[in-house]
């Protein structure tokens, strides 16, 4: 059942004595969009939007964007682990704001960091293999996996904001609405584009139905103006 209809069914507990089975049958034949328009957006019953949840996957976004995706007080999700996956061949994302000499300098620094990451990872694995021989009762594949995780743990400090990653989240309609608005007000081009992409995805017609998450898209509203990044790396002396 689409998130908007499940929110509609659960919200009926407030105004109806019907059981959840009866409410589910009710919402299948009634327009959940009109209900949300009236009670959520016009009357301000924001808790209704917490009852509908959607699963979204963000693939190939920068670590910077991933940090912003996860920057929600109420958020559940999982990201690509730098402890268990090799990022040496992932490349990196050059910010759209950079061009010419700036883009070239960024690219050179990114390539150098990924080369250093691969080198540190290899040397750490070799050193760990020398210092920590495999116990006789440990399977070789388990031993290799444990050493690889420890080597990645040492090398991942060389990964930077531009490295691409994947994030999956389960979020309420209200959280999704906040994300769209927050991304569209970002100072970073990638995040502004991501906000537009999420809004468009919410409006698509899945499997011949009306847009499932249209409530989040329609009422995310215009951005509230650019806002600065919350985290800044202080300049080195």
Image (cartoon, grey):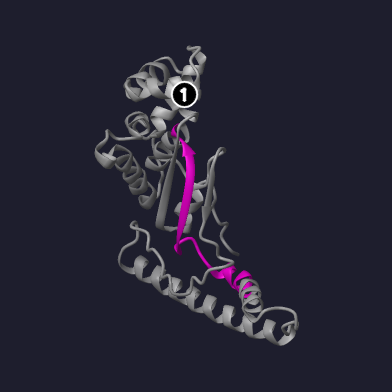
44 sits to left or right of 192: right
Q: Of 102 and 86, which appears nearest the observer?
A: 86
Asked whether the viewer can see residue 28, the reply is: yes
Give residue 181's position: percent from left, percent from top. 40, 36
Q: Of 121 and 95, which appears nearest the observer?
A: 121
Q: Can you tell which quarter of the image residue 52 is in? A: top left
Highlighted range, magenta: 151-173
Q: Of 182 and 169, which appears nearest the observer?
A: 169
Indicate whether 111 appears above or below 66: below
**Residue shown at the point (43%, 58%) measured from the top left:** 62
**Residue shown at the point (54%, 41%) measured from the top left:** 75
Which secondary structure lies at badge 1?
helix
Give residue 127's position: percent from left, percent from top. 67, 84
Q: Of 38 and 18, which appears nearest the observer?
A: 18
118 sits to left or right of 104: right
Give residue 192's position: percent from left, percent from top. 36, 46
Indicate whether 156 appears above or below 217: below
**Residue shown at the point (33%, 39%) measured from the top left:** 202
Whether residue 166 appears in magenta in the rendering, the answer is yes
Asked whether the viewer can see residue 45, the reply is: no
Residue under circle 1?
21
Residue closest to the far bottom: 130
Whether residue 231 appears in magenta in the rendering, the answer is no
The quadrant of the image that shows the N terminus is: top left
**Residue shown at the point (33%, 35%) measured from the top left:** 212
Give residue 102's position: percent from left, percent from top. 36, 66
């Amino acid at each position: 059942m689409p998130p908007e209809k499940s929110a509609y069914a659960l919200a009926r507990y407030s105004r109806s004595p019907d059981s959840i089975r009866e409410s589910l049958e009710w919402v299948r034949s009634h327009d959940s969009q009109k209900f949300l328009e009236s009670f959520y957006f016009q009357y301000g019953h924001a808790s209704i939007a917490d009852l509908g949840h959607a699963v979204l996957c963000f693939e190939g976004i920068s670590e910077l964007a991933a940090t912003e995706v996860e920057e929600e007080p109420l958020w559940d999700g999982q990201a690509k682990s730098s402890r268990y996956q090799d990022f040496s061949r992932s490349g990196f994302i050059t910010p759209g704001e950079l061009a010419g000499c700036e883009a070239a300098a960024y690219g050179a620094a990114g390539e150098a960091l990924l080369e250093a990451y691969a080198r540190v990872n290899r040397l750490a694995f070799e050193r760990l293999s020398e210092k920590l021989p495999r116990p006789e009762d440990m399977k070789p594949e388990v031993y290799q996996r444990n050493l690889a995780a420890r080597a990645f743990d040492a090398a991942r400090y060389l990964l930077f904001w531009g490295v691409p990653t994947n994030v999956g989240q389960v979020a309420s309609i209200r959280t999704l609405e906040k994300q769209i608005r927050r991304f569209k007000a970002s100072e970073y081009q990638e995040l502004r584009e991501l906000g537009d992409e999420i809004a468009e995805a919410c409006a698509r017609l899945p499997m011949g139905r009306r847009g499932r998450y249209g409530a989040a898209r329609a009422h995310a509203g215009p951005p509230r103006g650019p806002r600065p990044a919350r985290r800044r790396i202080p300049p080195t002396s």
